[in-house]
Amino acid sequence: MVCEIAYREEIKQLSLNAKKAGFAEMVDSKGLRAQIRRSEREIREVKRSMISVESDRIIQKRGNDVVAGVLENLDKHLQSIEARKFDLLSRLKNAAKMKRWNNWVTDFGAKIQELKTMEDEAKKEFLEGVVSTISAKTVGENHYECTVHFRLPYAEEGRNSINVPLVFTAVKRRRKRN
């Protein structure tokens, strides 16, 4: 029961922090895609302008020094647009990751709710499928440590899955005598 409450509180904090950190963009992925399309269109227009200016130089419509200045300005503008597009693509990718994370958290929460309604035997079978061993030891007069070893990795760092034991430390409180 204590773990379940801690889990709910952790999920609540993650959701609140995500909103505070500006992950509201996650909802606006449609707007990000529209901005990316605008950037791509602007990149094509700048490249066409660069070709046109270079063509003017070749047919001697404009002088070399004028063309060089115009091309330099267009190149700077092109680089800034490409940088903005890269930023938008990164934000869109992060929004997709956050959406997948939120979906996973929601699904996991639903699974926890299902576990509450399961019969004790079904809960036992579920835990036997997930947990390989549980050990407990005394770490002091009133402190205890419980270590849970999982059958499969429960966390992923980059592309490397990690399977480290989950350790809980508890304090047994003595009741006051009247």
Image: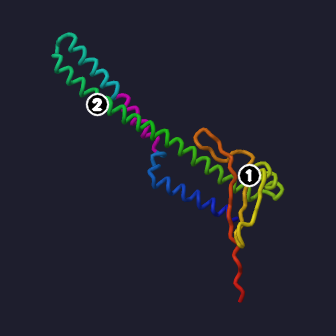
Determine the main secondary structure of the stretch shown in magenta.
helix
Between residue 137 and residue 25, name the one nearer to us: 137
Left or right: 32 as drawn, with respect to 108: left
The amino acid type, in three-letter code, at marker 2 is His
Farthest residue to the front: give it. 140
**Circle 2 — which element?**
helix
Quick check: 71 above or below 59?
below
Name the spot of residue 131 as percent of width and height, x first: 76, 51
> Which of the 4 quarters of the picture holds residue 100?
top right
Left or right: 58 as drawn, with respect to 3: left
Question: Which residue is located at x 54 percent, y 59 percent?
Answer: 13
Name the spot of residue 25 as percent of width and height, x first: 45, 46
Question: Which residue is located at x 24 percent, y 23 percent?
Answer: 71
Name the spot of residue 115 as percent of width and height, x first: 74, 56
Q: CA distance from mark 2 to mark 1?
A: 55 Å
Number of marks drawn: 2
Assign the N terminus to one quadrant of the image: bottom right
Mark 2, mark 1: which one is toward the viewer?
A: 1
Quick check: 67 above or below 120?
above
Q: What residue sits right under mark 1 in the picture?
A: 149
Between residue 95 and residue 68, name the one nearer to us: 68
Compare marks 2 and 1 and give the one earlier in the sequence: 2
Left or right: 164 as drawn, with respect to 29: right
Q: Which residues are magenta?
A: 28-41
